[in-house]
Image (cartoon, grey):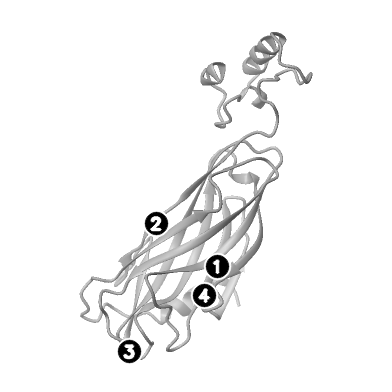
Amino acid sequence: MSTNNVLSIIRASCVAFGGQALAQSATASLIASQTTASPGDTVSFTLRVAFDDGGAPAGQFGAPGLFGFGGSISASGGAASALAVDAVRINTQLPVGATQETGTPSRLVTAAAGSGIGAALVGPQADVLTFDAVVDDSAAGAIELSYEGSVVLVIGDDLLTLSTSPGVNQGLLSVTGTTLQVGSARLCVDQNADGAITPADFNAWVLNFNAENSLADVNGDGLISPADFNA
């Protein structure tokens, strides 16, 4: 089943607010196993949904809670193309129509899954998917990851969709992204790569800087700037 079909299933199940007060809310957050990495490292990321059922009663879809999700995790920044996604795991309590795919370097993972009748995930939060990403050997700089998509909450006998781009009868889903800072595995100050730190490295840095060579990015921020001189 394709991602688009799964998303259509989830959205087709959702109804209007049905007179419910807009007390229900959810936030999608990306959690990284580490905030800094070196080239060659494997970093795990988790998409966590924290939700407030607003005191909704149980209904035909089960106890109030998280019913499903669907969307994409994207990366931006100078080193965004350096992440290669490995294993993707979807919460096994969301088994209906679960699907996943890795996309372009900027869109790392697209996934969707929904609960069956009476199978909402209850509690204040749920980890809906995790994935591993391998940092390319040549990467350096900041990579920002964010989620775009929707989650579905159970509210009594209705389902409520919260989306990062809400449509009719949908609420706004707030998202907290994460940033991975990738540092260089090389000894940055050894600009001429002779294995020693000597005054000759200063001249080599000037040459690299003028040539806009990435080796001159001593502070590893993805930019070649005067700040690298201070670093």
- Tell me the distance, in whole angstroms, between the alpha carbons under discs 4 and 1: 7 Å
The x, y position of residue 48, in whole percent, is 46, 63
Name the side, left or right, on which 152 lies relative to 75.
Answer: left
Q: Quadrant of the N terminus?
A: bottom right
Q: Are marks 4 and 1 in contact (CB under 8 Å)?
A: yes
Query: Is residue 47 left or right of 188 when viewed as pictured?
Result: left
Badge 1: residue crowd in 10 Å (few <14, some 14–19, many ≥20):
many
Question: Are there few (<14), some (14-19), or many (20+) residues within 10 Å of tag 2?
Answer: some
Check disc 1 and report the residue beneath it: 111
Say whether disc 4 or disc 3 marks the residue closer to the N-terminus: 3
Name the residue at 39% across, 57% down: 175
Binning the other alpha carbons within 10 Å of mark 3 as few (below 14), some (14 to 19) or many (20 upward) gives some
Mark closer to the chain start, 1 or 2:
1
> Marks 4 and 2, Cα distance to the nearest angstrom?
18 Å
Task: Verify CB contact (< 8 Å) between mark 3 and mark 1.
Answer: no
- Residue that mark 3 sits on: 59
The secondary structure type at the circle numbered 2 is strand
What number is the disc on residue 175?
A: 2
| Residue at disc 1, secondary structure | strand
Up the image or down, 107 lies above or below 126; here it is above
Name which residue lies at 62% across and 54% down: 104
Q: Residue at x 28, y 85 (%)?
A: 57
Name the residue carrying label 4: 113
- Please state which amino acid type lies under the numbered disc 4: Ala
Q: Quadrant of residue 36?
A: top right
Residue at the far bottom: name it. 60
Mark before the other along the chain sequence, 4 or 2? 4
Separation of disc 4 and disc 3 at Cα? 20 Å
Q: Which amino acid does the dot numbered 1 rest on?
A: Ala
The amino acid beneath tag 3 is: Gly
